[in-house]
Image (spheres, rainbow, N blue to C red):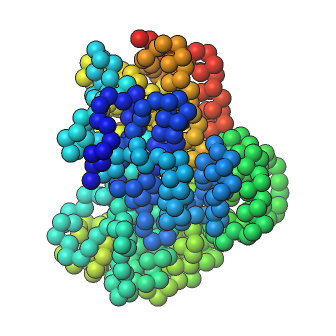
Amino acid sequence: MTDTTLPTDDLDALIIGAGFSGLYQLHCLRDRLGLSAQILEVADDVGGTWYWNRYPGARCDSESHSYCYTFSEELHREWQWSERYPDHAEIRRYLDHVANRLDLKRDIRFGTRVTAAHFDAAANRWRVTTADGMQLTAQFLITAVGCLSTANVPDIPGREHFDGRWFHTGQWPHDGVDFAGRRVGQIGTGSTGIQAAPVIAESAAHLTVFQRTANYSVPARNAPLTAEFQDWVRENRAAIREVTHSTPNAHPFRIENRSVFDVTPEQRQAIYEAAWAKGGLQFRATFRDLLLDKTANDTAAEFLRGKIREIVKDPDTARLLADIDHPYAAKRPPIDTNYFDTFNRDNVTLVDVRADPIEAITPTGIRTRSTEYPLDVIVFATGFDAMTGPLLRMDIRGRDGVSLADAWHAGPRNYLGLQVAGFPNLFTVTGPGSPSVLCNMPVAIEQHVEWITDCIAHLRDRGLDRIEASESATNEWMTKVEAAAAATLLPQARHSWYLGANVPGKPRVFMPYAGGMARYRRICDEVAANGYAGFTLGR
Ligand code: N01
């Protein structure tokens, strides 16, 4: 698989991953700064998370006109999205278009898994090893590995003896899965499971959804884009960008500057109804205090529970679906197409595995404490070892051979989510400690990639060749990350992957920076304007 036509000698920069981050990073370093740079990518094409996530219903929850690059007027003008939310195939087509348009593929080594990256202090080089035994060196190493790319398949006893087929949504077969006539069990009701269940139910003989934590969801209201809207998008790149750059979650709509308590209960109900009818993540933007004040949040939570009870006809099923243990949006809020209505189908059953835990996978199905469910297919919509997983599965070692796994044994620690003390010239695009997953990702990615590019240009312009985050700046930043989360209701979702709680043994640390993308951008700009304050620059 490895492309043997690419040079393997010393490069200025190596980038790991060919998704949104890696592609833009390659373009910036190679075409703007004139560096020698390559991407190493395990898949055999571009796409990043969208290369792998092809499960039924896989579609972006960000609206298409903001789920794209904004750095190029030409790219913006020549690409037209077809739906309010792009599906996985359309996003792959978009990234393929970008890669071809910018002629990026000639510097991507596909089918190449990085297994190790060790910093050689004497040579000031990163020595990178791949699974097929190749060795490459580079001055700068940039991880563009995504936040949600290490599948979390729970270690349920007996899985290896299951006679049917099982799949994790994040590693979905490219030729699809035929559910016709099959009894399907789906474990997991996060954003992925909520997208997948309605589509699986349409073709499966029977779908059993195993729910451990009930979840809120707001209708996506996906639809084809009108020609008028497409024209508006084409002509309004700057205005869309202005909004995505100034809002905390980097979406193309603003959070209303009003408190839940500024309006009467009747007005509030009308606001929630209108947001429900409009659909999408804008529901979270109806009031500024939804994620700050539990009493304010309760009003949205109760509205959404009421919708579940209204939609789902069987009262016991409705009760289980509405029995939600966390504030609205304290976990990443899903949006859906017919999720709750799916439980009105004759061929769909909900099982509460909090009350009746899964004990084993048997050769013929899933056994809970009380019941055996015969199945032909099991779908694990069980999420990811988020944020740190993709980094820690590589053997990354900094100065003095210290491993990233050791440096992060109690949870990720870094400065601005961009650099780890002791790991010079290593940059982590959308790493833990940055807003990343709390945002519309392409906006967060562009900011990181441009900051890293400017930083490397700064070093080169001054004849410097090394940059490393200081310990003291790291300590201060980690305090800010913790304080930003504590100021919100986000840590109240005890089972959230933001906290690492979904992976047994993972340290419970709130990983992303919750202070908002706009504020984060200002902080990063100030750090750069102050000569990269908090970093040590040298030769
Ligand atoms: O994963 P999740 P996801 N037994 O971790 C359950 C992004 N995304 O893939 O909550 C039984 O949220 C687990 O239960 P619990 C988005 O950022 C984006 O759905 O731990 N159940 C939960 O219900 C999202 O947040 C888009 O109690 C088990 C589910 O599996 C992130 O990806 C679309 C279990 C996992 O939910 C991850 O979402 C989809 C076990 N042993 C996702 N282990 C778009 O924008 C886990 N669960 C398109």
Determine whether, in the image, residue 255 is placed left or right of residue 166: right
Residue 17 in view in this figure: no
Residue in the image at 77% along x and 54% along y? 235
For residue 111, above or below residue 476: below
For residue 126, above or below residue 215: above
Residue in the image at 35% along x and 88% along y? 181
Residue in the image at 60% along x and 44% along y? 443
Determine whether, in the image, residue 221 is placed left or right of residue 508: right
Q: How many marks?
A: 0
- Residue 52 percent coordinates (x, y): 39, 59
- Residue 135 percent coordinates (x, y): 24, 35
Determine whether, in the image, residue 333 is placed left or right of residue 400: right
Q: Nearer the viewer, residue 18 or 401?
A: 18
- Residue 22 percent coordinates (x, y): 46, 43
Determine whether, in the image, residue 459 is placed left or right of residue 82: left
Q: Nearer the viewer, residue 326 or 49?
A: 49
For residue 107, above or below residue 460: below
Q: Quadrant of residue 126?
A: top left
- Residue 143 percent coordinates (x, y): 41, 37
